[in-house]
Image (cartoon, rainbow, N blue to C red):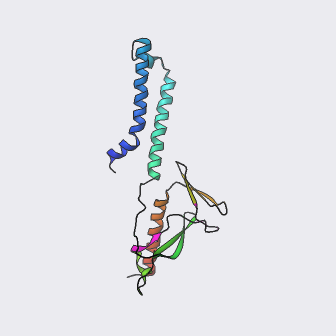
Amino acid sequence: MGIKDWILNHYLPGLLVALTIIILTAIYSVIKTGNGITIYTEIPIIIWIIIAIILLIWIIIVFIRNRMNDNTFPMGFVPRGEWVNIGSEKYGGVIWRIKQPKPVYLTNIRNDTSSIQVESTPRCPNCETELDIKDKYLWYSWWCVECGFKLRTWNNNEKIKRLVEKKVERKLERENPK
């Protein structure tokens, strides 16, 4: 996604709303007073400052939200057979299960770092139940339905999942140098 698409998708709708309000206010001023600018001069400066602050806060929130969601797609390696759990990794205060495709022949697939996949849903560090993930707009909440464990994070699941995959791949590379 280029900068043009990003601006069109995230900032343009809000700017169009602001522009529509300005135009509708000018139309109202023309109907009421006969002059399109009269109503703008009658609005106190404090109102203009409040509008500018609200617009600035909106721009900051859109920027933060876009940094949280890096728009990743949950696609990856898909094996022909089934997956085998090869372990787990504690990262970000939760447990992530690591899996690889089940070996077809007598090969040691644990050494192959290209087929490692981390489960997309983290598990509770207390009872290892899959956590329920809720998007709270400016953060994500992970909640365990079994024991009530709660955790907030700024990063989305896919971003943390990629970090865990990198960490596990590096750990396997250290254990099994070529």
| Percent x, y of residue 68 | 47, 52
SS majority, magenta? loop
| Residue at left offset 49%, top offset 56% | 156
Q: Is residue 6 magenta?
A: no
Horizontally, residue 1 falls left or right of residue 136, namely left
Q: Name above or below for residue 125 compared with residue 137.
A: below
- Magenta region, residue range: 114-131
Residue 76 in percent (x, y) is at: 40, 66
Q: Nearer the viewer, residue 168 or 20?
A: 20
Count of labels in the image: 0
Residue 72 vs residue 93: left or right? left
Residue at the location (47% across, 47% down)? 64
Q: Which of 112 and 76 is in front in this view?
A: 76
- Closest to the observer, 64 or 124: 124
Task: Residue 91 in the image: state x and y as whole percent.
Answer: 54, 66
Residue reaching furthest to the bottom = 106
Residue 127 falls within the magenta-colored stretch: yes
Quarter-wise, where is residue 24 in the image? Answer: top left
Looking at the image, residue 156 lies above or below residue 39: below
Residue situated furthest top in the rendering = 34
The location of residue 36, given as percent across then percent down, is: 39, 17
Give the quadrant of the C terminus: bottom left
Residue 94: quadrant of the picture: bottom right
Image: 38 above or below 116: above
Pick out the residue farthest to the front.
Answer: 81
Write down the quadrant of residue 103 in the picture: bottom left
